[in-house]
Image (cartoon, rainbow, N blue to C red):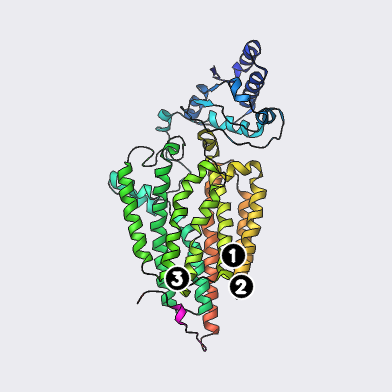
């Protein structure tokens, strides 16, 4: 094990490597590792500087270099990020280099691992600046410590997830209500049901995710203090809470028509699969998109009794591409920790090509939203919201987000709630405009019966 207390040891360490390297590839990679450390710079706190002085890196063994692709990633300047090997990270002070990385990403990885404080140091750090505590978080902190855990595991202190789950369902409700001229009282009732359901099912999804990912969460600095990962809550308590959440969700679903109940139940396997997908594919964000935007189908069915695929299919697709955008940005917060523990994501898949790929997803998102509105017969009000609201918002995000900054990724991830709100209020204005235009010729339809009598 080679200890690097400061840059002054670089020359000595490299000399020792020259004298003692037994394998050419091992030497080449070790020297590159030292060079990456020497040229990396970052701003650190005194605690992080202490972690840097005691940080160490293990030299790779010859068995780590059996892959020709790995050798290419060492010697070719712009080699792509290759599939990481799953290994267990044992200590914050020791970075075991087990991953097939491009040199550029490895340099960033070296910068990051030097700045990671030990578990003992972490306890001394101030509250994370990444979490802007709002009213909900302040209210939770006033509760007894054990009670707080139940709210934290449901992420009640971070309502952004609930909003992102709620928006697609509300869009669908408003589109169906506009098309079928449903009375506003019924629209308000259904929207309230969907909002409550989004809160409950988002909490249930977080519990399922934490139960699957307990061991991974322990090794990721941002998630290490979650109730299950920290050991403050038992699995049994989480299971009981999950059961109560699912029961409440079912109670809300039973207020809807039969088809809504059937389609709602069909989403549960997707919700349960999401935490598992990050172990086997670099596209877990796609699975999340399928689950998080299921409301785009349910909203129309809750109003009309059956889906109008010409409207709901492109609306659902728009939500999926939108989810790929915001959750890829979100995943960049943990990309270096994910590399260590073997978790996969689109952030690692796209790597330095993230912004160009997200631009393509943004085009698909806007195109699908426009197609859905066209098939629903929307007026200029809806299109104005998309053109003058959604498009500038996505451009602003993709121009300004820094995928190598946790603070920036967190900020622009949260900003996506406003993207959903723009579409919601555009459709709400469309609904009232349509109602005023057709007030002298209202359309009554038995198919608009939504709730069980």
Local secondary structure at mark 1: helix
Mark closer to the chain start, 1 or 2:
1
> Which residue has dot 3 on it?
302
Which numbered dot is residue 375?
2
Q: Which residue lies furthest to the bottom in this view?
A: 440
The quadrant in which the C terminus is found is bottom left
13 is higher (above) or lower (below) than 384: above
Magenta run includes residue 163: no
244 or 120: which is nearer to us? 244
Magenta run includes residue 443: yes
**Going 49% across and 57% down the picture, which residue do you hit?**
292
Toward which corner of the image does residue 7 lie, by quadrant? top right
**Going 63% across and 25% down the picture, which residue do you hit?**
66
Mark closer to the chain start, 3 or 2:
3
Q: Do the residues under discs 1 and 2 have CB atoms within 8 angstroms?
A: yes
Q: Do the residues under discs 3 and 1 have CB atoms within 8 angstroms?
A: no
Toward which corner of the image does residue 352 lie, by quadrant? top right
Which numbered dot is residue 314?
1
Q: Can residue 360 be seen in this view?
A: yes
Residue 111: give x, y in percent of width and height.
58, 31
Q: Which region shows up in magenta?
A: 440-448
Local secondary structure at mark 2: helix
Position of residue 386 in the picture relative to residue 230 (left or right)? right
Position of residue 219 in the picture relative to residue 4 (left or right)? left
**Going 63% across and 68% down the picture, which residue do you hit?**
371
Position of residue 317 in the picture relative to residue 219 (left or right)? right
The prevailing secondary structure element of the residues shown in magenta is: loop
């Amino acid at each position: 094990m080679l200890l690097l207390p400061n840059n002054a040891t670089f020359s000595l360490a490299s000399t020792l490597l020259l004298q003692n390297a037994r394998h050419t590839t091992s030497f080449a990679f070790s020297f590159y590792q030292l060079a990456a450390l020497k040229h990396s710079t970052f701003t650190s706190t005194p605690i992080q500087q202490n972690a840097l002085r005691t940080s160490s890196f293990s030299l790779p063994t010859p068995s780590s270099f059996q892959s020709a692709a790995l050798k290419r990633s060492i010697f070719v300047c712009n080699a792509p990020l290759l599939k990481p090997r799953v290994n267990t990270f044992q200590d914050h002070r020791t970075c075991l280099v087990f991953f097939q990385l491009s040199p550029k990403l490895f340099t960033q990885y070296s910068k990051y691992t030097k700045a990671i404080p030990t578990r003992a140091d972490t306890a001394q750090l101030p509250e994370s600046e990444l979490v802007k505590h709002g009213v909900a978080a302040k209210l939770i902190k006033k509760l007894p410590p054990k009670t707080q855990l139940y709210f934290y595991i449901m992420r009640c202190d971070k309502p952004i997830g609930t909003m992102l789950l709620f928006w697609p369902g509300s869009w669908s409700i408003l589109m169906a209500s506009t098309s079928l001229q449903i009375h506003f009282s019924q629209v308000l009732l259904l929207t309230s049901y969907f909002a409550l359901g989004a809160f409950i099912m988002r909490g249930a999804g977080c519990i399922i995710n934490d139960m699957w990912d307990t061991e991974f969460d322990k090794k990721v600095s941002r998630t290490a203090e979650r109730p299950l990962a920290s050991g403050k809550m038992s699995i049994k308590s989480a299971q009981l809470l999950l059961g109560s959440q699912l029961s409440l969700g079912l109670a809300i679903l039973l207020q809807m028509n039969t088809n809504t109940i059937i389609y709602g139940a069909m989403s549960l396997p997707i919700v349960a699969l999401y935490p598992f997908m990050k172990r086997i594919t670099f596209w877990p964000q796609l699975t999340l998109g399928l689950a998080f935007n299921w409301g785009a189908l349910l909203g129309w069915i809750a109003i009309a009794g059956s889906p109008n695929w010409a409207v709901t299919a492109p609306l659902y697709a728009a939500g999926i591409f939108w989810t790929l955008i915001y959750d890829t940005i979100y995943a960049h917060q943990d990309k270096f920790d994910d590399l260590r523990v073997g978790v996969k994501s689109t952030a690692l898949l796209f790597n330095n090509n993230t912004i160009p790929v997200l631009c393509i997803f943004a085009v698909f998102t806007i195109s699908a939203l426009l197609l859905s509105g066209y098939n629903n017969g929307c007026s200029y009000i809806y299109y104005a919201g998309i053109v003058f609201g959604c498009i500038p918002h996505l451009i602003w995000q993709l121009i300004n987000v820094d995928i190598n900054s946790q603070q920036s990724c967190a900020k622009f991830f949260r900003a996506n709630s406003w993207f959903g709100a723009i579409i919601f209020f555009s459709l709400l204005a469309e609904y009232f405009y349509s109602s005023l235009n057709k007030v002298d010729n209202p359309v009554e339809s038995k198919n608009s019966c939504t709730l069980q009598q």
